[in-house]
Amino acid sequence: VKMTKSSKISKVLMPFGKSGNIYLFGAIGQGLGPVVLTPILTRILDVKGYGEITFITSFAAILGILFSFGLPIVISRSYVLEEESRYSITKWFKQLTISYLVLSALLLSFGENNINVYILAVAFPFATMQLILPLARAQDKASQFAFISVIGTLLPSISVVLNNYFDSPFSSAQALGFGAIIGALISFTLVST
C-alpha cells in the first residue's frame, strides 16, 4: 500500500487518529490552564488569598477522587462493555451529579467563611468531574471530553479572577466553588445530551 503525500502529512500531524488527537489536545489544554492562570492569580490575590485558594484546590482535588468512589472505572468499563447497564449507569450518574452539585451550592451558601466547608464545597464538583470525564470517553464524545477537560480546570480559577476584577461581595473561596459548580454543570449538560 503506497501512501500519498497528504496521508503522510496527516499521519505526522495526527499520529493518534482524529479522536485520539482531540483527547490529546484536551489533556494538553488541561495541563496548560494552571500554568497560564497562576501568574494572573498571584498578581490579583495577596499571599494569604493565593495560599487559601491553592490549599482548598489541593485538598478538594484529593477528596474529589475519594468522593468518586472508584466509579470512573465502573463507568469506563460497564458503559462500553455491557450495553444493558447503560440506562442504570446514566440514571445513577445523573442522581449523584445533581446531589453533589446541590450539596456544594448549599455548603457555599451557608459555609460562614469556614475553609473546611469550602474544601468540601469544591470537592463535590471535582468528584462530579471525575465521573463526567469517563462517561464522555465511554460515549465516544472526544470533542466534548476535550472541552470538559479544559473547562473543568480553568473555570474555577477564572471565576476567582472575575470575582476580584468586578470587586464582588463573594470571597475568593466562594468564587472558586461557584466556578467549579458552573464548570461541572456545563460538563454535565454536554454528556447528558
Image (tube, rainbow, N blue to C red):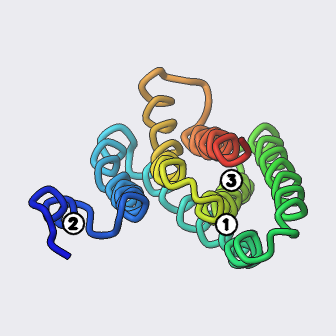
Whole-number angstrom distance, CA of label 3 to CA of label 1: 8 Å
Residue in view at x 59 percent, y 63 percent: 137
Mark before the other along the chain sequence, 1 or 2 = 2
Q: Which residue is the site of mark 1?
A: 64
Where, by quadrant of the figure, is residue 128 drawn?
Answer: bottom right
Q: Can residue 53 be seen in this view?
A: no
What amino acid is labelled 3 in the image? Pro
Residue 20 x/y as whole percent? 40, 65
Answer with mark 3 or mark 1, whichever residue precedes in sequence.
1
**In this image, 120 relative to 175: left or right?**
right
Q: Are marks 3 and 1 in contact (CB under 8 Å)?
A: yes
Residue drawn 51% across and 36% down? 159
* Viewer can see residue 63: yes
Give the crowd class for mark 1: few <14, some 14-19, many >=20 residues within 10 Å.
many
Element at label 2: helix
Instruction: Determine whether the residue tagged by mark 1 lies in a helix, strand or loop.
Output: helix
User: Which disc, if any, is residue 104?
Assistant: none
Nearer the N terminus, badge 2 or badge 3?
2
Going by the numbered disc 1, the residue's amino acid type is: Gly
* Residue indicated by mark 3: 125
User: Where, quadrant-wise, is the C terminus in this rendering?
Assistant: top right
Give x and y (percent) for residue 28. Answer: 34, 60
Residue at horizontal 54%, vertical 48%? 144
Alpha carbon of mark 1 to alpha carbon of mark 2: how far? Answer: 37 Å
Q: Distance between the residues labelled 2 and 3?
A: 38 Å
Viewer-side residue, 151 vs 67: 151
Quadrant holding the N terminus: bottom left
What x and y, as percent, mark residue 73? 69, 78
Q: Is residue 26 above or below residue 84?
A: above
| Residue located beneath label 2 in the image | 11
Residue type at the position of mark 2: Lys
**Vertical relation: 21 (above or below) 118:** below
